[in-house]
Amino acid sequence: MHTVVLVLVEVLIVIGLSRLMGLGCRFIKQPLVIGEIIAGIMLGPSLFGLIAPDLAANLFPAETIPFLNVLSQVGLIFFMFLIGLELNPKYLSGNLEIAILTSHVSILVPFSLGSLLALLLYPMVSNSSVAFTAFALFLGAAMSITAFPVLARIITENNLQSTRLGTLALTCAAVDDVTAWCLLALAIAVTRTNSMAGAIPTILYSLLYIGFMVTAGRWFLQRLSSYYDRAGRINQFVLAGIYMGVVASALITELIGIHLIFGAFLLGAVMPKTPGLVGELAHKTEDFVLTFLLPIFFAYSGLRTQIGLLNRPELWLLCVAVVAVAIIGKYCGTYVAARVGGIEKREAAALGWLMNTRGLTELIVLNIGLSLGVISPLLFTMLVIMALVTTFMTSPLLEWTYPKKLIKLDVMEPPTVEEGTQMASPTYRILVPVANPNTQKGLMQLAIAIAGTKLPFAAVHPLSLIQLEEDYVFESTPAEAERLIQERRYRLEQLIQSLEPPEVRQLVHPIIRTTNDVARETAQIGKLDRADLILLGWHRPAFSRNRLGGRVGQILTQAPVDVAVFVDPKGSDREFDNRFYEKLLVPYSANIHDDLALELAIRLLSNSDNRQLTVLRVMQDESVKSEFSYELRNMMDQLPSSLRDRIHIEIVASPDPIQVAVQASASVDLTIAGTSRAWGIERQTLGRYTDQLAVQCLSSLLITRRYSKLTSHLSSVLTNQSQEEDLAPSSETLS
């Protein structure tokens, strides 16, 4: 009983630390798997056993290790089933000839270099009980691995799944995955029989079993797919049968003489890729496997990793050589093959860094090698460091080689004015983050009212971000992400077609992306898309009552463009109707954020002849202040009389500007206020905004935050008005 309790305590610590380290890695834009591997190493002799050896020995005694091993092996079996399940034949549809060439060269070069490195390492880190052939095969296979799940996640996070680079990388990784697992199976067979000749029966049995699964096994699983099409769900009986099949297939490959993981992977690979069936099966399986069982595998690996074994400078030099050979072999092999295949330099370089990621897949290979005794604990530690380094470097080097500004935004291009002539590029862009297309029609109508149909060409971009919550989950696979993007695009199209009047629909061009950080991605797209304004709808954060907290607050703080937040006391799903927003109020305290509020109000004013604008100045003392900032005063002087006549300035003396603004808001339809202390909307030390006016305002409220004084929202207004005035005399002459 004591052992069981101790194992449960170990599991509790492992899961908690894995999640914590994983979140830390997500914060620095690294895959979750790196944090989980580091958490496992921290619990082992490399850190915990070093700083508290007695406590480590009591918490992770030798008698509990077999229990962790069993749990980790079960986790590996079902994880490999998930990898096979998510290996979609769709990934083999793009540039197959180039992909086969690139992937095979990217395996051959590091495999050859690894085998040459084995000549140096064998006498230093191995012994005579291990055949050199088996040692060289394992080292070559370890150098050749590409982590398909990590690569697929990176591609999805960077929205590369629809680009040539993304499809080519997925195809290369899929071919690489299958080839590398075959090499590993060969290495295991040679290791267990201690010769190439002895491995031949194992190879033949493996080929027979693969043939059986691809034919009879696939035929039977097609019946399962037909059943799912009729029933529409997987019940517990069917799920139990599938899990029994996973375990049985794993046992068969173990009996054949390769390894448990191959049978589980094979069953997942031959499973029919019906989206609904695969999606539900992945959902039912992955949560427990990825959050409970897989961290135990990382901890088990960490307990076997002993960085303290690298206790001499020459051993660290050997470790550097191992890392260098792995990187040079994989990157150079991929780059040269891609260039020969006709891929341009930048894409070939990015493909090389993508194929160089190893992650969890490498760790699986290393644990098999250590369990079979073909690699020593010292070499195991070196290769774990190599796996961490190559995985960690992928994301920053990909961003450096192929920055996001080169990735074409998923934007529907504006229609042509007439055949053979293209519409001019938008002079004014509004980015509108849309969390739910079904409830934010009012926000879209407001964006269109600001953009306007009377002014020179403007564009409104509803931004729909599909958030990826975790690593390896089914939604993170590029094929599923693409399906979700198409589904979201359809919903946005329905929203666009519901906008009135019909002519405003031509202004709307949606952007749809996947991301793991909505606020950061919104800010980045606002910069890359050269948006003039980000228009947000407010929401109440889960852990705060502040209307400007949560993601809204993050975007207000991070976005390198002007931001406006729409707070509607009657609900965000209420439609914005020009007739309901005829009376506008701008409380003005002569700062850049109030300048933005006034500019947006004037845009609204210029897009409707029925609107009236009141500018409220609250004087707290007897000193005389300028009504407007110098820059805005110059711009106001350029407005035509048709607009100036509808702008009314009201000056009130009061020690409480907020209450004056609240009382004035009772008689208007829309209040537009800048973020300033005067209106109780102030950025505090840690970036949090107060929301006093947002709570008390009696009308709809638009809160503005200016990023740069160089951005003018009235340029197109002034241009349009001056053109109208220039045309007016000629019209009179003609008459």
Image: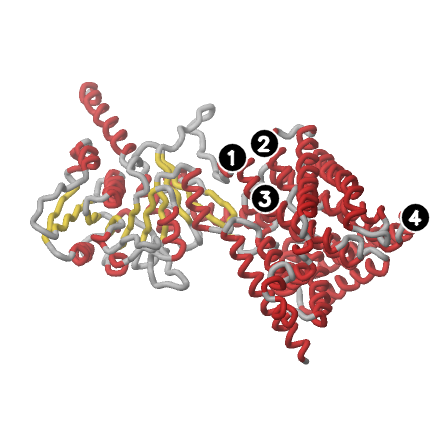
Measure how far apart labels 2 and 4 are at the Cα level.
44 Å
- Residue drawn at x 38%, y 45% is 559
Q: Earlier in the sequence, mark 2 or mark 1?
A: 2
From the viewer's perspective, tell me whether residue 3 is left or right of residue 616. Answer: right
- Residue drawn at x 57%, y 49% is 481
Q: Is there a contact, CB below 8 Å, between mark 2 and mark 1? A: yes
Residue 554 position in % (x across, y down): 39, 52
From the viewer's perspective, tell me whether residue 679 is left or right of residue 311. Answer: left
Q: Quadrant of the N terminus?
A: bottom right
Residue hosting label 4: 197
Numbered disc in front, either 2 or 3: 3
Q: Earlier in the sequence, mark 4 or mark 3?
A: 4
Of the pair 211 and 60, the residue shown nearer to us:
60
SS for tag 3? helix
Residue hosting label 3: 393
Of the pair 487 and 526, the residue shown nearer to us:
526
The residue type indicated by label 3 comes to Met
The residue type indicated by label 1 comes to Leu
Residue hosting label 1: 406
Numbered disc in front, either 2 or 1: 2
The residue type indicated by label 2 comes to Arg
Q: Is there a contact, CB below 8 Å, between mark 3 and mark 1? A: no
Residue 210 position in % (x across, y down): 82, 52
Numbered disc in front, either 3 or 1: 3
Q: Residue furthest front?
A: 312
Measure how far apart labels 4 and 3 are at the Cα level.
40 Å
163 vs 255: above or below: above
Residue 221 seen anywhere in this rendered image of the structure:
no
Measure how far apart labels 2 and 1 are at the Cα level.
10 Å
Measure how far apart labels 3 and 1 are at the Cα level.
20 Å
Residue hosting label 2: 346
The residue carrying pointer 2 sits among few (fewer than 14), some (14 to 19) or many (20 or more) residues within 10 Å by Cα, namely some
